[in-house]
Image (cartoon, rainbow, N blue to C red):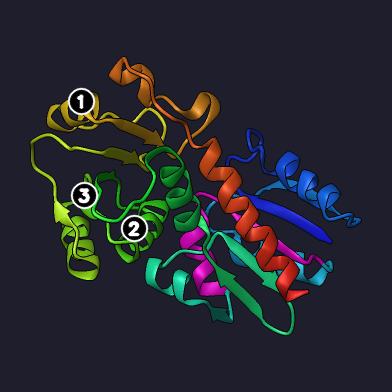
Amino acid sequence: MKLAIIGDPVAHSRSPEIHEGFLREARLAGSYEAIRVPAGEAARAIAQLRAQGYTGCNVTSPLKEEACTVCERLLPAARHAREVNTILFGREIVGTTTDGVGAAQALRHRLGSLRGREILVLGTGPTARATIAQLADEGVRQWLWGRDAAKVAELGRSFGVVAYTSGPIADAVFSALPPAAEPPLQVLTAASSAALVMDANYGERSTLGALLGREVVDGYEMLVAQARASFEFWLAGT
C-alpha cells in the first residue's frame, strides 16, 4: 500500500507514524509519507498520486474543500460535511471524511454515551462541519460559535445546531479553530467552566489550553481514531 497525507503544513503531522503502525499491525508492506501541497494545488497533487499508483491519501488543511471538487464520487459523510480528508484511488477517485467519527470517538472515550450531552463546537470550517454532522447523528445537543455569523446560521439550518451567544455549557467544548485563534470572552468563559475541553489541534499547535489556563485534551486521540477509520476504508476498498 502506498499512502500519503497532503496539505500545508504537514511537517508536524504524526499521521505517518500512526499509519506505519497500522501497516505493521496488519502485516502489510507499504509506506506513508507527508507531502506538502499548498492551497490551490489539490487537483494537481491528487492526479499525480493516482498516476504514481498510490492506494489512497489523507487530506488536511487547507485542501479539504478543494478535494471535494476533485473526487469523482463522494460518500455521504463527505457530501454532508462538504469536506474530504480521505481518498481512495481505484476505478474512481472516492472521497470520504473520517473527521467526525474521530471527534465523536475521542469525546465518547472521555464522556461515555454522547446522546443528550450538551456540547459547544467552535469553528465553521471543514473539521467543525464533519464533527457537527456526526454529533447530530448521535443525538448531541449542540451549540455553535464561529467568527462568520452567516456560516453559523447556515449550519444551524442544516444540522439543527443553535448559535451560541452566552451561558454555561454542561458537558464539553470542542474547538476546531486554527492554532492561536482567540475567541471572545463569553466563549472563553464557557470553556473555562465546561467539564471537558477538547482541541482538534495537537502537539505544539494545540494552544487553547494556554489561552484558557486549564487542562485541555488535545487532538491526538481524535487523530488516531480518524486515522484508524481511514485505514479501514482503504483496506475495504483494496
Residue with the mark numbered 2: 135
- How packed is label 2: few (under 14 Cα within 10 Å), some, or many (20 or more)? many
Single out the residue that lies furthest toward the front.
112
Q: Amino acid at mark 2?
A: Leu
Mark 3 or mark 1, whichever is nearer to me: 1
Q: How far apart are the alpha carbons under marks 3 and 1?
A: 17 Å
From the viewer's perspective, is 104 left or right of 2?
A: left
Q: Assess whether mark 2 and mark 1 are in contact (beta carbons under 8 angstroms).
A: no
Q: Position of residue 24 (x, y in %)?
A: 85, 48
Quadrant (top left, top right, bottom left, bottom right) of the C terminus: bottom right
| Local SS, label 1 | helix
Q: Position of residue 170 (x, y in %)?
A: 19, 37
Mark 2 or mark 3, whichever is nearer to me: 2
- Upstream in the sequence, badge 2 or badge 3? 2
Q: Which mark is residue 193?
A: 1
Q: Is residue 106 visible?
A: yes
- Upstream in the sequence, badge 1 or badge 2? 2
Q: Amino acid at mark 3?
A: Leu
Q: Amino acid at mark 1?
A: Ser
Q: Assess whether mark 1 and mark 3 are in contact (beta carbons under 8 angstroms).
A: no
From the viewer's perspective, is 159 left or right of 217?
A: left
Q: Nearer the viewer, residue 47 or 229?
A: 229
Q: How far apart are the alpha carbons under marks 2 and 3?
A: 12 Å
Residue with the mark numbered 3: 144
Single out the residue that lies furthest toward the left.
166
The part of the chain drawn in magenta is 54-70
Where 92 sits versus 115, above or below?
below
